Image (cartoon, rainbow, N blue to C red):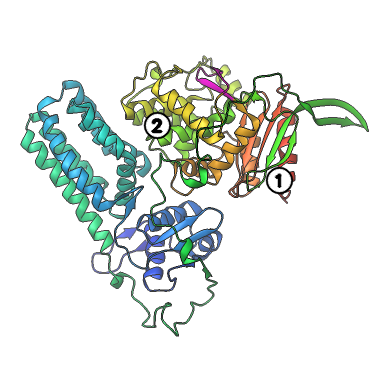
Amino acid sequence: MNLSDSQTGGPAARRVSAMEAVLGHLRGAIERGEYAIGDKLPSEAELCRTLEVSRPVLREALRALQTMGLTVSRTGKGTFVVADAVEEPTFGDYAAGHLLEVRRHVEIPVAGYAARRRTPENLDHLTHLLDRMDRETDTTAWVAMDTVFHLAVAEAAQNPVFRRVIEEIRDALARQSAFLNELGGRREQSNREHRAIVEALAEGSGPGAERAMAHHLDRVETTLTDIVRSTRADHPTSGGPRRDRPGRPRPPGSDVQRFPAAASPAPGSGIAGAPAPASSPAPGAPAAAPPVREPGHVPVARLVRGGVVEGVHHGSVVVLGPDGDVRLALGDPEAAFYPRSALKPLQAVAMVRAGLPLDGELLSLAAASHSGEERHLAGTRRILDLAGLTEDDLRNVPDLPFDPVVRDAWVREGRAPSRLAQNCSGKHAAMLFTCLLNGWSTHDYLDPGHPLQKTVAETVEDLTGQRIAHVTVDGCGAPLFAVSLHGLARAAARITTAAPGTAEARVADAMREHAEMASGTGRDVAALMRAVPGLLAKDGFEGVQVAALPDGRAVAVKISDGANRARIPVAAAALARAGVARPR
């Protein structure tokens, strides 16, 4: 069965995306009763093989099923059916009806105030944003700008309380926007509606702006209703009895597993930005900061030539089991140290919790130590463009590209070090975008006292489960937090075991699915993620490596002399001690 190129039936046939086709197929199977409440859907690998679609397409469809309230995903266990009909979609923690009710009571009058109070700068920003939305073809990027648009209208009302209300629901708005544009084809229509709102703002017409916003929200509600009311006539049954009725035959080739009803969580696993139970620290405040001392490293790698030990690398290693217990500890994994760039997944989680609407390649780039390839530079420009900024707004340290081949070509062309080429530019662009979405200043975003960096520090303490021992400046100019190697491994495990849809899961999915965007062509950390299914891995300067699996197993390595050549061999040995089989 190939669903990669499908059409809807009827006289007004139209081509639908592969995701829509997969979603329609699975939704129909659930509504026909081929999968009853409590049934586990086939594995991702089996569904990809059967439906002949890629894993990213399938995962988009599975996320849509969960948004519709038909399924729930359980990390490491699979996707289970929890309802046999779509009642009301849920966007994060908010039901669609509740979200629309609030939007009508807030955004309509806000548009009226904005028409009367907007400044020329507000209009310039909104007009520029609309022009970019008209040109945008990527759904993820368009959704990010859609959220910025509604925040910008609230900003134009010149009342910070209005903006804070929109900020509270911004993640839900982004999820709703993605849902409607993927399934309802709303992008062009939304662009026209947005432009009508801005035209009313430019005219200074409060009633006109309110009418334009009300019309926009009416169309949103209509599209949602059309999706929800997609009747079972769209997915005709074969006439046989439902699976939950006696005598219903099992679909050919099915191997349905049961999920105990008592354990079925409610649809809507949590808003991105709020830690899920699976990834939250133990109740109470984080533990005390790790001690600052000279670490008691031990030999962890030996270079042997002809039976003679030619070199020895000292370091520390920690291996955690699925339950979080320490299975192996070498050296001093409880002493404070600097994770360097291995901290980037935690920084990315903090930004997503704060409303960063990126996913896929761009979110992976936000957690990257990239090689400076053209795709990395283009991706960083894309994030800056979404924020309405340029390379000049970056505050990271200018540098040459990290990859030797790219760097040599850069130098031959006579190009100077730049902020864009520096390996942390994706993170810095994402930091700027996060600041703009929250109304925070951008010129001082690297100050440890800045709201962004305070948010990052809180997230680091949340995920590591311990207080930060010390703060300094990393090589790129961003604040760097000292934690323990044990805490870093614990944080990685919490990211990989987080519930689907959470900030942690979004970061993990992005980095695993776009490993080269988080590193570069030929980089060992990308090869490691490709070799071990489900593995999340991040390296850091001075011999740091962290890796974790979806079941909670995790390892963290620090090579004391910073030697890169020992980092991956020691990490591979640690993964073997965690039970990871050597790739064939």
> Who's the residue at 63% across and 35% down the image?
546
Instruction: Using the image, tell me which numbered label, if any, was put on residue 578.
Output: 1
Depth check, mark 1 against mark 2: the one in front is: 1
Depth check, front residue: 326 or 46:
326
In magenta segment, residue 142: no
Compared to residue 493, the image places residue 71 above or below, namely below
Q: Residue at x 61, y 23 (%)?
A: 338
Q: Residue at x 51, y 25 (%)?
A: 424
Question: Residue 5, how many percent across, how many down?
Answer: 40, 60
x, y percent for residue 244? 42, 77
Q: Is residue 478 magenta?
A: yes
Neighbor class of circle 2 (other Cα within 10 Å; few <14, some 14-19, many 20+) is some
Q: Is residue 450 above or below residue 269?
A: above
The kind of secondary structure element at disc 2 is helix
Tell me which amino acid carries mark 1: Ala
In the displayed orientation, state which residue is furthest to the front: 284
Write down the residue under mark 2: 382
Q: Quadrant of residue 522?
A: top right
Which span of residues is magenta-colored?
A: 469-482
Measured as percent of width and height from the top left, residue 149 is found at 25, 35
Q: Name the foreground residue: 412 vs 514.
A: 514
Q: Secondary structure at mark 1?
A: loop
- What amino acid is found at the position of numbered circle 2 in the picture? Arg
Residue 365, placed above or below residue 493? above
